[in-house]
Amino acid sequence: MTTPRPAGPADHAAGGLTKGKGLEGWGTPALVLGIIAAGTAWLFGWVGMIVGLAAVVIGFVGTRKAFHDPDRSGGAALAGLVLGLIGLAWGLAIVVPAQLGIGTFGEGLTLDQCMAQAKGQQEQRMCATQHLDEYHARFPGSTNN
């Protein structure tokens, strides 16, 4: 059981609020960034990753401060941390396969259908990788680089 702290001179001057703590509001920014990260990561992977990373950092700092100070509630900071992790993980799940060219573009299609739908060189490489045998049979001297 915690005992209430005695009121000091700073408490009376500010109407009961303690002065000098500085940067007390870590929970609200973490929660807002976490909501943005989790809400946008499925559509904009990079946004979810960047905002999620910021939410994780701010949420971690906020929960640590709340853990060490019994007068603070770390619920919003913890929620921001969790939502930031969700946004970061989901953003990574979208961005990394796209950057490595291992997405599901062109699955279930023939090489011609896949190449017709490809909108760039990266998607053409994905088609060639997925239909490697057919690609080498049609273009024997080419490499998949």
Image (cartoon, rainbow, N blue to C red):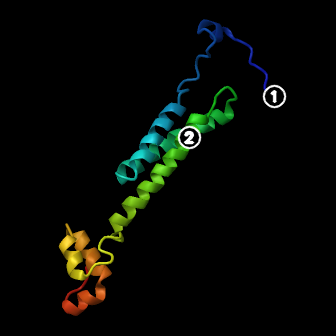
Q: CA distance from mark 1 to mark 2?
A: 25 Å
Residue sitting farthest toward the top: 13
Q: Is residue 2 left or right of residue 68?
A: right
Dot 1 or dot 2, earlier in sequence: 1
- Where in the figure is residue 7, as x and y percent of width and height? 71, 12
- Where in the figure is residue 104, as x and y percent of width and height? 35, 70
Q: Is residue 114 left or right of residue 59?
A: left
Label 1 SS: loop
User: Do tag 1 and tag 2 residues touch (Cβ < 8 Å)?
Assistant: no
Q: Which residue is mark 1?
A: 1
Give the class, few, some or many, for how many residues have Cα within 10 Å of label 2's Cα (few <14, many ≥20): many
Q: Is residue 103 above or below residue 78?
A: below
Label 2 SS: helix
Give the class, few, some or many, for how many residues have Cα within 10 Å of label 1's Cα (few <14, many ≥20): few
Q: Is residue 80 above or below residue 139?
A: above
At 25% from the left edge and 70% from the top edge, which residue is drawn? Answer: 123
Q: Is residue 89 above or below residue 61?
A: below
At 37% from the left edge and 59% from the top edge, which residue is drawn? Answer: 95
- Where in the figure is residue 19, as x and y percent of width and height? 59, 16
Q: Is residue 65 left or right of residue 5?
A: left
In the rendered image, which quarter contains the C terminus? bottom left
Q: Quadrant of residue 108?
A: bottom left
Q: Amino acid at mark 1?
A: Met
- Where in the figure is residue 13, as x and y percent of width and height? 60, 6
Q: Which mark is residue 79?
A: 2
Q: Amino acid at mark 2?
A: Ala
Q: Which mark is residue 96?
A: none
At 74% from the left edge and 14% from the top edge, which residue is drawn? Answer: 6
Q: Is residue 27 left or right of residue 140?
A: right
In the rendered image, which quarter contains the N terminus? top right
Given residues 30 and 13, the one toward you in this image is 30
